[in-house]
Image: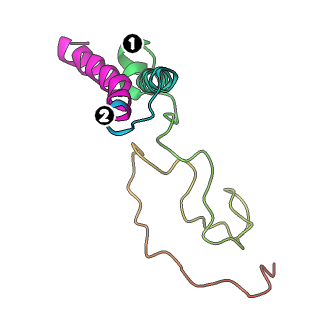
C-alpha cells in the first residue's frame, strides 16, 4: 500500500469521527458531553469497520483474495419481481427474479433491467 492510500484512510476516519461532533456543537444548543462522545465513537467505529470490510483491505491488508460476495456490495438473495412471486430461487420452475443472486456493485457482467412493474396486485392479495 502506498502512502497516499493510507493518508486517505486516515482522513476518512478523522472526518467520520469529528464531523458529527462539530455539527452537533455548532447547530444544537442542547448538545452534551455524552452526545458528543457518542457521535465521535459511532463515527469512528463505523468508519473503521467499513474500511476493514472493504475490497482493498481484503487485498492489501489481509493479503486474501476478494471473497465471492464483498460485504455491502452484492445481494445475498434473489429479489422477486412482485410481492406475489414465490419462485425466486435458481432452479425453481418459473424463476425470473427482478435482481438475481449476487447482483450489485462489482458484479462482473452487466444486466439490463427494464422498467419496473408498478401495477397493483389483486385487491384480495396474491392468488397463487
Q: Quadrant of residue 125?
A: bottom right
Magenta stretch in the rendered image: 1-24
Q: Secondary structure at mark 1?
A: helix
Camera-side mark, 2 or 1: 2
State left or right for residue 95 relative to residue 64: right
Residue 120 is one of the magenta-drawn residues: no
Q: Secondary structure at mark 2?
A: helix
Q: Quadrant of residue 97?
A: bottom right
| Residue at screen point 21% across, 12% down | 2
Q: Nearer the viewer, residue 51 or 108?
A: 51
Crowdedness near tag 1: few (<14), some (14–19) or many (≥20) residues, C-alpha within 10 Å: few
What residue is pinned by disc 2? 26
State left or right for residue 69 relative to residue 62: right
Residue extending furthest toward the bottom: 123
Q: Nearer the viewer, residue 5 or 13?
A: 13
State left or right for residue 81 relative to residue 21: right
Q: Position of residue 92 (x, y in %)?
A: 73, 62
Residue 15 is one of the magenta-drawn residues: yes
Q: As displayed, is residue 65 above or below residue 127?
A: above
Amino acid at each position: 500500500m502506498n502512502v497516499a492510500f493510507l493518508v486517505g484512510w486516515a482522513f476518512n476516519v478523522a472526518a467520520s469521527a469529528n464531523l458529527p461532533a462539530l455539527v452537533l456543537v455548532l447547530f444544537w444548543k442542547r448538545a452534551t458531553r455524552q452526545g458528543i462522545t457518542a457521535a465521535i465513537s459511532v463515527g469512528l467505529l463505523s468508519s473503521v469497520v467499513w474500511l476493514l470490510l472493504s475490497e482493498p483491505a481484503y487485498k492489501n491488508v489481509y493479503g486474501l483474495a476478494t471473497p465471492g460476495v464483498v460485504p455491502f456490495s452484492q445481494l445475498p438473495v434473489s429479489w422477486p419481481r412482485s410481492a406475489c412471486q414465490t419462485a425466486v430461487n435458481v432452479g425453481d420452475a418459473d424463476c425470473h427474479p427482478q435482481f438475481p443472486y449476487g447482483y450489485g456493485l462489482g458484479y462482473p457482467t452487466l444486466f439490463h433491467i427494464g422498467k419496473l412493474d408498478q401495477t397493483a396486485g389483486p385487491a384480495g392479495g396474491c392468488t397463487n
